[in-house]
Image: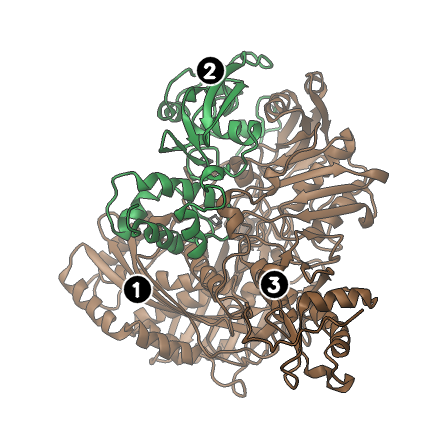
Chain colours: A brown, B green
Amino acid sequence: MVAILSEVAPRESDVKSPLHAPALHESGLKHTSGEALYVDDLPLLPGTLVGHVIASPHAHARVVRKEARRALALPGVHAVLFAQDIPGVNDVCPVRGVHDEPLLAVDEVHCVGQSVALVVAESAALCRQAAALVEVEYEALPACLSIREALEQGSFLPHWLYPGPHLIRRGEPEAALLAAPVRIQGECMTGAQDHFYLETQASLAVMEEDGAVRLWSSTQHPSEVQEKVAEVLGLGRHQVTVEVPRMGGAFGGKETQAAPFAALAALGARATRRPVKVWLNRDQDMEQTGKRHPFWARYEAGFFEDGRLLALKAELVSDGGWSNDLSHAILDRALFHMDNAYFLPNVEVSGRVARTNQPSNTAFRGFGGPQGMFVVEEVLNRAAERLGLDPAEVRRLNYYHEPSEHRTHYGQLVEGNRLPRIHAELMASSEYARRRAEIDAFNAASRWTKRGIGYQPVKFGISFTTSFLNQAGALVVIYGDGTVQLNHGGTEMGQGLHTKMRAVCAHALGVPAEHVRVMTTATDKVPNTSATAASSGSDLNGQAVKAACEVLRERLRLVAAHLLQVDRAEAQGIVFAGGRVSHPAYPHRSLTFAELTHAAYQAQVSLSATGYYRTPDIGYDRKMGQGKPFHYFAFGGAVVEVEVSGLTGEHRVRRVDILHDVGSSLVPTIDRGQVEGGFIQGLGWLTCEEVLIDAKGRLLTHSPDTYKIPALGDAPEDFRVQLLERAPQDSTIHGSKAVGEPPFMLAIGAVTALRHAVAAFGPPRTEVQLASPATPEAILRAVEAARSVKR
Amino acid sequence: MTDSKQPLSDGSAPAEASSPEAPEGTTRREFIATATVGSALLLEACRHAPPVEGPPPGTAPAELEVTFKVNGQLQTLKVDPRTSLLDALRERLGLTGTKKGCDHGQCGACTVLVDGRRELSCLSLAVMHQGAEVSTVEGLAQGDTLHPLQQAFIEQDALQCGYCTSGQLMSAVGLMSEPCGASDDDVREAMSGNLCRCSAYPNIIAAIQQVRRLPKL
Ligand code: FES
Ligand code: FES
């Protein structure tokens, strides 16, 4: 029962491969019709209860009494749970072996917003009423609220294995500094940034048979949610299943910090035997979760008169908040990006994590990279100002050259260096030189409005720097009718991962993308996954999907050879494309993919397969400060033009030209969106987003009426984004490169442009003092300072 | 900084009440209920007003009946008068396409049309809409035919995570019948109340302009 061969020559494929082609967003129709479900939209089982977190109002205090009797007396209140009600381990620290993050405070609270108790009741309103009746008595203790205070008090979060600062060194920086003709020293700070994912943290937990629990969580890391829930409840991980339908944005904020709220939902469900949903409102979300790490840096740099960098010594301290979370990995990445695009011949960079009484700071797009890079860019900007040079030229002078000559400060070869090419192409296409001259003329003629232009190159290392995390899995299931379900370990947060994975799968099996359905991410389909983070989602999962499809294709190839009457030895030549299966040597015989899969099913051939991938040959020795932590580097460049009002300190971003390297883009429309979105989010971090706390450590900017993220009007007025052409990358999925994080740092070009404009308020060679974020207040102060420089 | 050993009771400070705008001991929603005012604008102003005594805890006000049309269908609901239009849509009518991004009238995710005009559904009470026509994203398409703006948002890739998308769309639909200049700048201004954290802004403008440049039917 196999003769289903159709004697039609395969047409010039009806269906083009979706790879390397623009594509409509996998969920576009669902998003525009309102059909797309996020955790908070899932239909609830009858009896679902609401979980409400009672959070510490103190930055640091002893907890002397907890009493819930009055709350529990309210009808409809099902439970009030404290630390002592946790059946398993009261800890959700994401780092193995470190136990410094209790899910619920035991006898001490370490920040405003730390979870103290969970109220479970019939409705959110009832929860709030009950929460007001829960009596928690505190004894306030002194709090440490900033990096400066932490430095004074010697308050740090030491690494659990290597207690000293992380230090990377090369050459003789001290001697080189002494010999340097030009020396620049100073301090700088970068600020916190709230993730402000539009969908706040949300989890729904439902008890199943045998004491098992199933969760729907808005998380980038379902496997870690599974692990933490299992530990908190004292279950084996096989008793916990976590599903992620999709996220309404995450940006790192749901890498580790979704797990505590999922664990609370699970705890509530276990205590009440009813489904429990924990959803944070915007204020709670902003108050209770960590942010991008603020960084403080002290630096000393030496230059030649022509702008070449001779030596750099820098010390970084990040604000880790009250517990470890991912602070050390974030510090590592900051140190790895202290070079950005530049060869540092003599260098010493070191870093520590401060412990403060703030919510534990966490991953955020760039993961420390932007904070490290900011320092070297500040140094170069100051050098250009001091020496009266074009800052773009100072950058060009210091680029890495060929890998044979140049390794990074941590010893990795800079292979496939596209910085010089991007520089040349972008300088030409953006007409940088002409516009810079025009701006200088404009500034000379305009008293209160000045313009500035800045060029920003970016080199960003791709891989988790914790090497073992660089692995991924997939499960591909083909049904008898030739349609496909694709499961992979990555989560969709808006970055277009599902769209890309569907393209990889459809391409490998030669079927139309519409025949591939990407399933929600679930720990029972693809287990032991890493977070969808470090820009690595499509690099890692793409390879796993491809591997699974290749297994299936090999199995199907044998069936096809039989059906196409092709010799087994020739089976390798069989082509899967355009929904058909054929052999170029026999153009008149072909099968549809559905005919083939049906036949395979009948021939008792398995139609599902897993795929697995791990990144080869990476590793880093922290003690030595040497190694190859990255699989490869992503590159990009941006030219940013701004206009500053010297009267109000406000600015406009007039034009931005970006040329970004994504290798051979898997789906160019998606990549372009990532570049644009990343850049604008970077602008937010550097210009309008300012996290403020009061003297007691309470967040003042806890909602969008006090915390300003970029709105439509803040996007560049003229925005020209190009992906670098003819730039395939070796040994990545179909020659593509990661894109999620690198473009974020292109926005540092806005700082260079702002400095150019601000300097124009002073005499030539004015050295600008511009704080970050460059809010109107900060710009105004910088303008005042520039204007008071003596001519 | 308090450094005394004096015990501080947390009895009256649930997480939400720690917001400086909320009066001591009342949550914002309960507070709204005590302020019987007729316009969302006034409600917003009241959030910054000095504390007012709330009703004794545990006494929910009597439910009120409200009848309005949602996407052309007549709906009659009995609601707690404190229920926002957003919660009525999401929780009572199962229309979860409209999102709650902030519940503060600051992000635009909850934008719907009321009698053809865009409105932030988190800032208005369901009971204020007796007899009104409410349109949500679920009602945009006519059967299988997408609204031109839905089509344009898909074609222009004007979305990433999608969480702001329904609000952007409804805001854009409202914009179509408002006086608004033809330039991109005019659209930037008119759409500035709808935040997109993914910053799909360039494509959102492109999608809206694509439709505005279509010949009028
Ligand atoms: S939810 Fe209504 S404006 Fe944000
Ligand atoms: S698409 Fe994510 S917030 Fe707009």
Q: Residues within 10 Å of mark 1 (few under 14, many from 20)?
A: many
Residue in view at x 43 percent, y 40 percent: B107
Write down the residue under mark 1: A767
At numbered mark 3, what does the secondary structure look like: helix, strand or loop?
Answer: helix
Question: Is the CB atom of the residue marked by disc 2 within 8 angstroms of ligand 1's nearest atom?
Answer: no
Chain ID for label 3? A
Q: Amino acid at mark 3?
A: Met
Q: Quadrant of ligand 1?
A: top left
Q: Is residue B78 above or below residue B171?
A: above
Q: Residues within 10 Å of mark 2 (few under 14, many from 20)?
A: some
**Residue A466 placed where, x, y %?**
67, 65
Question: Which dot marks residue B63?
Answer: none
Q: Nearer the viewer, mark 3 or mark 1?
A: 3
Residue in view at x 71 percent, y 41 percent: A263
In front of the other: A686 or A229: A229
At numbered mark 1, what does the secondary structure look like: helix, strand or loop?
Answer: loop
Q: Are marks 3 and 1 on the same chain?
A: yes
Write down the residue under mark 2: B34
At numbered mark 2, what does the secondary structure look like: helix, strand or loop?
Answer: helix
Of the two numbered discs 3 and 1 on the same chain, state the one appearing first in sequence. Answer: 3
Quarter of the N terminus of chain A within the rendering: bottom right
Q: CA distance from mark 3 to mark 2?
A: 52 Å
Q: Residue reaching furthest right?
A: A210
**Quarter of the image holding residue A124?**
top right
Q: Amino acid at mark 1?
A: Glu
Residue in view at x 51 percent, y 14 percent: B64
Q: Nearer the viewer, mark 3 or mark 2?
A: 3
